[in-house]
Amino acid sequence: MVNLLKPPSVPSSRLATVTGLWRQHSLYDRRALKTGIVHFGPGRFFRGHLAYIIHNYLAQKDSQEQRWGICGVSLKSQQTITRLKPQRFLYTLTKHSSCAQNREEAQVIGSIREIVNGRDKCEYVLEKMASSSVHLVTLTITQGGYHLDKNFNLDTANEDIAHDLQNPSIPTTAIGFIVEALRRRRDRSMTPFTTLSCDNLPRNGDILQKAVLAYAELIDPQLAEYIRDNATFPNTVVDRIVPQEQESDSNYPNRLLQVRDRAPIVTEPFWQFVVEDKFTGDRPKWEDTGVTMTSDITPFLYMKSRFLNAVHSFIACLAVRAGIEYMHEAITLPEFNLFTRLLMDDIAAATPVPREMCEQYMEQVLLRLSNEALPDTTERISSETARKVGKYIFPILQDAYSRKVSMKRIILPVAAWLLAVREEASESGQPYHAKDTQSAITAIQEGAVISGILGLENCEQTEVVDNECQQALRDIQTHGLLTTLKNYSEGGLLNETVSA
Ligand SMILES: NC(=O)C1=CN([C@@H]2O[C@H](COP(=O)(O)OP(=O)(O)OC[C@H]3O[C@@H](n4cnc5c(N)ncnc54)[C@H](O)[C@@H]3O)[C@@H](O)[C@H]2O)C=CC1
Ligand SMILES: O=P(O)(O)OC[C@H]1O[C@](O)(CO)[C@@H](O)[C@@H]1O
């Protein structure tokens, strides 16, 4: 690892290649690396999280463990392949923090052996998945890649799934690949691989398993039974903020490592990977490198999905209505900061986890979100809010309702988002184009109430949620967003200094 605080600037003509730098400073022999993991969705998060964790693992372990190299599979886009192939799938990762002493640290990541296009190389991928060296299949394909309905069940009417059901031996979806590869392994009397979802879904392994079984059942009930009895889908909790690419990203490898990188990753120092320890076969000794192996992910999931993901979405919803472009700009405004602290208190009161467990985590989240060294757009975090309300926010509302915690602050950001989507603008008229499910956008613009948008029509708490939301909408429209944040913060933490 190269760590240079004030490196000399190098003229662009003298920048080295990533491959050249790796040759000089290689931490392990990539030629000796075997493929032990097939990964679907080699996007930014995968490159900033799992590929980084595996890289560090390979760097620490002896030759015996050099069998956990990764084969990435892209089903939707050729872009990552086009950019990474010329540099043999090596890339730089820069950790950037505004609070740590070592603000910038860059390294070259070598754990990806190859990335292939699964649509063009379907048979190659299936055989790789069915090979004896592969023990893990991992996914970061976004929620859309699972083809789920709003209850997180497989949407068998989806056209890609329908295609795969008709043509199971030439799949196009991750679910189709998993089932066909497991069939091949069964027919060859091999141990099934373990499939790890690393997407932000609540109990992602359970959701994936249910989708895989529903799909397999439609193809071959005996195969479904085999998968149910023999394959495992551990739940995971994954965390690391990996923003969308910024134009300035390539400055980091240029300046810190004196290399030119066509596909750099810039991320925060923090990462978390919690894995339910139920594997069918071999796995990396992850516990040696900071991964949490556990029999129960529940408390980790509560903390992460509520205090990081939900809070992140809440701030983004408020920020887009306020016309704020970056997350750190919002969280460091006093009105936002105080409101967020109180909101976290409400969430803690609604969450069945001991308060002491939440305290430190909450502070850490505030610090992470205010990292101005890692510009993360409110647009990225507010995208797919309709889905996120279902997966992150609705469970909090349910618990708030049953524990008699006020929903006022929890609903306010949702109301702010509804207004931004409805008016396609921030409060001051800057355009806002929600990246969201079209049906949800249409419903919002036609004036649907929040319970209708969330599909909560017949729930116990429908009326309370709708009333609170209507009130919040009126408050924002009457007083403006910042004043409403102040009003909704009255009575809480008044004597505390709000850290900006
Ligand atoms: N970026 C972040 O900070 C974090 C992201 N995640 C999760 O990681 C997942 C990926 O996010 P990013 O890597 O940031 O996004 P990205 O857009 O960089 O990558 C998404 C990847 O999924 C693939 N993909 C998209 N739709 C697909 C489909 N229908 N079928 C198969 N593959 C599909 C894309 O081709 C790409 O390889 C998301 O589920 C997100 O929840 C989790 C924690 C942090
Ligand atoms: O779009 P998704 O699936 O909610 O994932 C993004 C979430 O994950 C994170 O990037 C970090 O774990 C958060 O920043 C964000 O809340």
Image (spheres, helix red, strand yellow):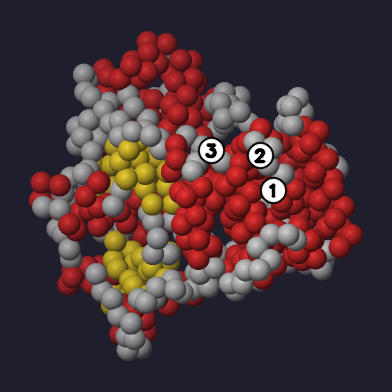
Residue drawn at (33%, 64%), measured in percent from left and top? 91
Question: Spatial distance from mark 3 to mark 1, Cα to Cα?
Answer: 17 Å
Q: Is residue 165 left or right of residue 260?
A: right
Respond yes or no on whether mark 2 lies under 8 Å from ligand 2: no
Kindly identify the amino acid type of the residue bearing the numbered disc 1.
Ile
Which tag is nearer the camera, tag 1 or tag 2? Answer: 2
Q: Nearer the viewer, residue 281 or 302?
A: 302
SS at mark 2 in the image:
helix
How many numbered circles does the render carry? 3
Contact (Cβ within 8 Å) of mark 3 with mark 1: no
Mark 2: few, some, or many residues within 10 Å (few <14, many ≥20)?
A: many
Residue marked by disc 1: 410
Question: Spatial distance from mark 2 to mark 3, Cα to Cα?
Answer: 10 Å
Q: Position of residue 107 (x, y in %)?
A: 29, 68
Which tag is nearer the camera, tag 3 or tag 1? Answer: 3
Residue drawn at (33%, 16%), measured in percent from left and top? 229
Residue marked by disc 2: 400
- Return the disc, 2 or 3, that comes first in the chain's sequence: 3
